[in-house]
Amino acid sequence: MGVEAGAQVARARALAVLRIRSRALAIALLPAAAAVILLAGGSTGHFVGPGWSVARVVVSVLALVVLLAAGVVALVVARARPAVSPTVAIAEEAAPDLYRLVRDLADRLDVPAPSAIALTPDCDSWLEDRTHPAHGPPAPRSADEIAGAGSGRHLHRRTATAPVLVIGSPFLWWMRVGELRAVLAPVVAGTGPSAQPDIAAARRFVRGLDAAVAASADRGRCPGLRLACAGIGWVARLMLRGCQVHASEMERGVAAAAAERAQAVDYGLRIVAQEQVGLAYAGWDRLLTRVALPAWRMGRWPSRLDAGVVAALTELSRRDRLAEGFASRLGERPACDLLEEPGTVDEATSLLAARLFHGGPAESGPDWSPVDWQEYPDEVVDRKWRTDAARLHRVLDTLGVRRAPDPSAPHSGGPAPDPTIHASVGPTLARVLDHLTPADGVETAAGHPDAYGAPTLTRATGDRGREHDESFGHEGPSGYPGHEGPAGHPGDEDTPAPNPRSATLATHLGVEVAREEAAAAPPAAGQKADTPPWDDGALPLFPLQPPRTDRELLTDHVTAMVCCAAMDTVGATPGLDWLDGPTLLVDGVRVADLAPRVLSLVEDGDAAPLRAWLVELGIRPEKPVRLG
């Protein structure tokens, strides 16, 4: 009864949407009906006289104009290309077991099977209608789809309105086969109400209106055509507002009917699987912001993001008590085994993720190449730290800061710089420390430099102890070891920094970074017939972070300079932490307490905590470092 009730509610709302379409048609035909009445009255001798003749001409002309305008609007609504979600299409020969699982699930639910399967680099799953003539049959696109997806072999019982099943790619790698089936059950059950003619017609009408609004918003036209598009957009938006409530209630009814029907399939397992959905979402977000984003900014895209989310969640299970027991699931068969070539699919979804979340190119090239996880520390972390350090010294050169430290200048703690170093030697960390430390000294915010104590090291692998268990969800996405994000330190507010030298240097760094990003940004490409049906000029569609503030940029660059000095003087190595991103390893041990010392220097101009940290590890700030 619950299924029928939900379906009946959805059908009633669909009929309400279709009535709005009928009313719009009636309004468009009203002047024509009046013109017909006037013409018929004149021909029969009932409406005679000069006034009736003028009325017949005016109403006839008005009817022709309204009919012409209505025809144009109807044509745009019918022919406008609805937007589709960016996905990686999966052919049946590329995943026969996955298609078989979905087919069996549809049989158990007694609903039509989806027409095709596609993957999206997100933690969600849904049904998507792609029956519009502009979409055509599923075809391979090198930009975001697996070759062979449109071979024509689809699930049985395909109908003209069968939607496409879109599955979040992280689900395939993290979930087990049974969990994936339980999660997909309510989604696949939605094909039943979707096949109802009235619901399908109402959805097509709403999608057409939405596409018409998007098409009329294009400003790259001549003034006359732009005026016509404005009128079409106004009419489409008016009808769309009228359909909004009914369309929303219709979709709720469809979801209720699908959920009610799916309760008969793996209901107990679905409760457990929903926990994995939330965990996968947290791990995926962490992986994108901490690990993938620094690589994307360096012109490299990790080619195994889905495999990386498994490593990230496995690492979380070692750190967080809430995740204990999840790793035991890894002994079961993962859902990615349902794919014939999971590595190829992972690479395609990883490239699409970089395009959607960062705006990278659609294909690999000299400035946009894949990187494996084994190469990540050397190809991404090391390069990024040295590139940022080089940028920092370029800005210091622009500001006229001398390279060689002044032996007569006072230093707050730590060894005095070597007076034998000549001004012509390479860039040093001491140059940065001396510049950010005011000559008269500034007391730290805490007032106790010794409170930082000796450097804290955390093992890069294995058990980390409870002192770091709370790190998940508290460190920011800057891509540096131990750096807290926009909500992690008092420097979030857009207030002037206590250290005026830091404020000046941060401003110049922000200008330099913005200039480099503008020079590296590819020109916006026009929409072509064979390109994905979303706006390439609006990429990234889903930015991961707001732009970094100048102060955050300065903190990142100073941290990079410290890491470079550690690598070049004490043999430290760059590393990859699956949850925190790039990290510094000293003798195979992860450095965990660098961030507060750098913040003390940047925000308060107090270099004593950082100098004490350098002395403890044997790092010599006066030694030149190799820049990128």
Image: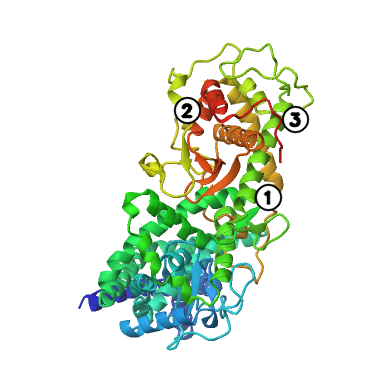
Identify the residue at the far left of this view: 1
Q: Name the residue under label 1.
A: 521
Q: Is residue 57 in sight in this rendering?
A: no
Name which residue type carries label 2: Ala
Q: Which residue is drawn at 36% across and 81% down?
A: 105
Q: Residue furthest right?
A: 424
Binning the other alpha carbons within 10 Å of mark 2 as few (below 14), some (14 to 19) or many (20 upward) gives: some
- Residue named by callout 2: 454
Marks counted in the figure total 3
The image shows residue 620, relative to residue 439, as above or below, that is below
- The nearer-to-camera label among 3 and 1 is 3
Pointer 3 or 1: first along the chain: 3
Name the amino acid, label 1: Ala
Which residue is found at the position 69% from the left and 42% from the top? 516
* Quarter occupied by residue 508: top right
Give the x, y percent position of residue 116.
48, 79
* Mark 3: secondary structure: loop
Q: Which residue lies furthest to the bottom in this view?
A: 157
Which residue carries the number 3 mark?
426
Mark 3 residue crowding within 10 angstroms, few (<14) / some (14–19) / many (20+): some
Q: Tell me which label, 2 or 1, sits earlier in the chain.
A: 2
Where 103 sits versus 468, above or below? below
Is residue 284 visible in the rendered image? The answer is yes
Q: Which residue is drawn at 58% across and 67% down?
A: 348
